[in-house]
Each structure stands twice: as structure tokens, then as C-alpha cells.
Image (cartoon, rainbow, N blue to C red):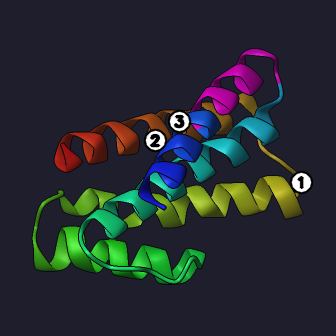
Amino acid sequence: MIETFHQRSKENLKAAEMLFENGLYNASANRAYYAAFHIALVAVYQSGYEPKIDHKALNSIFSDLFINRRKILPSKYKSYLYEMQSIRNFTDYGSGVNKKKSKENLEKAKEFIEILTGVMT
């Protein structure tokens, strides 16, 4: 399961970058969120937990494990998944995002993946 989600994270990040480069900002923001979501699943699984694959539940267990209890990550990452999901929801169910918001989601995903990859190795 870990390798599957790790591969999905990489694939989604690559897709988000390609979509952004081609002006598909809503789709890019969506894929950026899922890249971060999947790497968070990997981190939680590697910590010995088998989380419910649910957006709210994952955000909660991730924050509890890596920020509140173990203090592995700075507190600023506590809101990353929630903020990125909010953007994703706006792209999927709202009026969409502009280039700037899409870029912000993509950059957050890259930062989140980079910091978690460093923690997991």
C-alpha cells in the first residue's frame, strides 16, 4: 500500500506540473492536492498506522502524529492539507481558481512532499 500511494503522489505531482504549464489551472490545483494527500498517507502508513482513507480523518491523524505528538514538523504544516483541499473543492465545486492560486497550491504540494520525503528517509 505504501508504494502504491507513494507512486500516486509522484504521478499526481507530475500531472499537476504539466497541467499548470498548459494553462489548466483548476485541474493542476486538484492534482497538486492529491499529490500531497497521497504522500501524507504514505507518512502515516510508515508510522505504523492504517488510516481511514478519508480527507478529514487523514488530516487529523497526520497533524496529531507529525505535529502535535512527535513534533517532527513545524506547526505551519498542520493546515497545509486542509488549505489545499479547500482550493481543490473550489476548483471542483466552485467557480475555479486563477493562475496565481493554482501556482500556490502546486508550490505547497511540492514543499509538503519535499519535507515529508526528508522525514521519511
| Residue drawn at the location 17% of the way across and 57% of the way down | 74
Say whether residue 53 is left or right of residue 98.
left
Question: Could you say whether the residue bearing mark 3 is in a helix, strand or loop?
Answer: helix
Viewer-proximal residue among 73 and 38: 38
Say whether residue 20 is left or right of residue 52.
right
Q: Earlier in the sequence, mark 1 or mark 3?
A: 3
Give amino acid for label 3: Lys
Which residue in the protein does label 1 denote?
95
Rendered view: 82 above or below 119: below
Which residue in the protein does label 3 denote?
10
Give amino acid for label 2: Lys
Q: Earlier in the sequence, mark 3 or mark 2?
A: 3
Rendered view: 102 above or below 33: above
Which residue in the protein does label 2 denote?
108
From the top left corner, tell me how far across and down residue 105 is, in percent. Answer: 57, 42
Q: Earlier in the sequence, mark 2 or mark 1?
A: 1
